[in-house]
Image (spheres, rainbow, N blue to C red):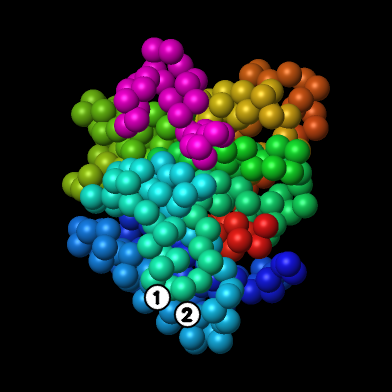
Amino acid sequence: MAEPNRVIAVDLGGTHIRVAVVCADGLLTNRRSIPTGSVDGPAVVLQRIVDLVDSVANEAGIALETPVGVSSPGPLDPRTGEVLFTPNLAGWRNVQLGERLRAGTGRPVSVANDGNCAVLGERRFGVGAGCTDLVYLALGTGVGGGVISGGRLIDGVRGFGAELGHVVVALDGPVCTCGSVGCLESFVGGWAIGRDGALMATTRDGEAIRRAAKGKLITGDVVAKAAATGDAVALAILARAGRALGAAIGAFVNIFNPEIVVIGGGVAAIGNSLLDPAWKTVTSHSFHAHRTCVRLELSALGDDTSLYGAGALVMD
């Protein structure tokens, strides 16, 4: 069967449902976005996705046989399209996302974890275009990612693999939201940077962080703002997160021997105060032969990574 020139992409997030048409040349058209409203329960959210897909398809004149790709938070089983559980969507346990959307839209539907979708999008449309071996890391509130090795997506026996944010970088590190100890996410996730900032804000040295917070919750963004003023405490927090990131990247370089490691997500936008320590740390946590053949790049897909990834999922 010929590769479709246009497909429908769905980005299911905890805050918004976004749908667009993804063209083979990388153009995104007919974008639509609505609040997810996960508090209304899975059945209501699923109907919202169906309605939005139908609306976009009708507006774009998309044929009924055109496939739909869905990027969803996980863990989920891409073989069946079942979302087993996700903390970002209230009440989502063992939800047959793929099956329900196929029935509701009458279209072929493929579902994958948002991290795995993202690495597919980077390979087809991003800075990793054409690469057969690449690692993608999404630094956001949490940390996700995906791996392509030898041209194939690495996702394990049930599709749960490549949970890159939960590789352990410190045996005596902080407790992670997953229940483990010392995960990469527990250092570099937005919530983790905010946690460290809030702790330092209780001390005399945390004045700049308190000032940046303006009486509101201390988040990773607040720490980044304080660091941008040159505050030594905030810079130290980001440097520690960066070193953890570099240690993890070094491990991925050793394990997968990728051609490129792509960093995306909102936390990556913090910039050099986080990434410079990461790049330097990679050197001391990877074999020389491995790191000399890898490029470290920032994603150019921005907020559209999941849409591109959902499109690449069905185009591939």
- Residue at image coords 43%, 44%: 76
Residue 74 lies, in percent from the top left, at 41, 45
Q: Is residue 258 magenta?
A: no
Q: Is residue 283 above or below residue 13?
A: above
Q: Amino acid at mark 1?
A: Leu
- Residue at image coords 53%, 58%: 110
Where residue 149 sits, quadrant-wise, is top right
Query: Which residue in the structure is indicated by mark 1?
Result: 52
Residue 32 lies, in percent from the top left, at 43, 75
Where residue 282 sits, quadrant-wise, is top right
Q: Which residues are magenta?
A: 156-183
Q: Is residue 285 above or below residue 19?
A: above
| Structural crowding at the residue carrying mark 2, measured as other residues with C-alpha within 10 Å and reported as few (<14), some (14–19) or many (≥20) | many
> CB under 8 Å between callouts 2 and 1?
yes
Relative placement, left or right, of 203 versus 252 is left
- Residue at image coords 41%, 41%: 75
Secondary structure beneath dot 2 equals: helix
Residue 184 lies, in percent from the top left, at 46, 28
Quadrant for the C terminus, please.
bottom right
Query: Which residue in the structure is indicated by mark 2?
Result: 56
Q: Amino acid at mark 2?
A: Val
Cα gap from disc 2 to disc 1, whole angstroms: 6 Å
Numbered mark located on residue 203 in the image: none
| Structural crowding at the residue carrying mark 1, measured as other residues with C-alpha within 10 Å and reported as few (<14), some (14–19) or many (≥20) | many
Q: Is residue 146 above or below residue 182?
A: below
Name the foreground residue: 308 vs 247: 308
Magenta stretch, main secondary structure, is loop
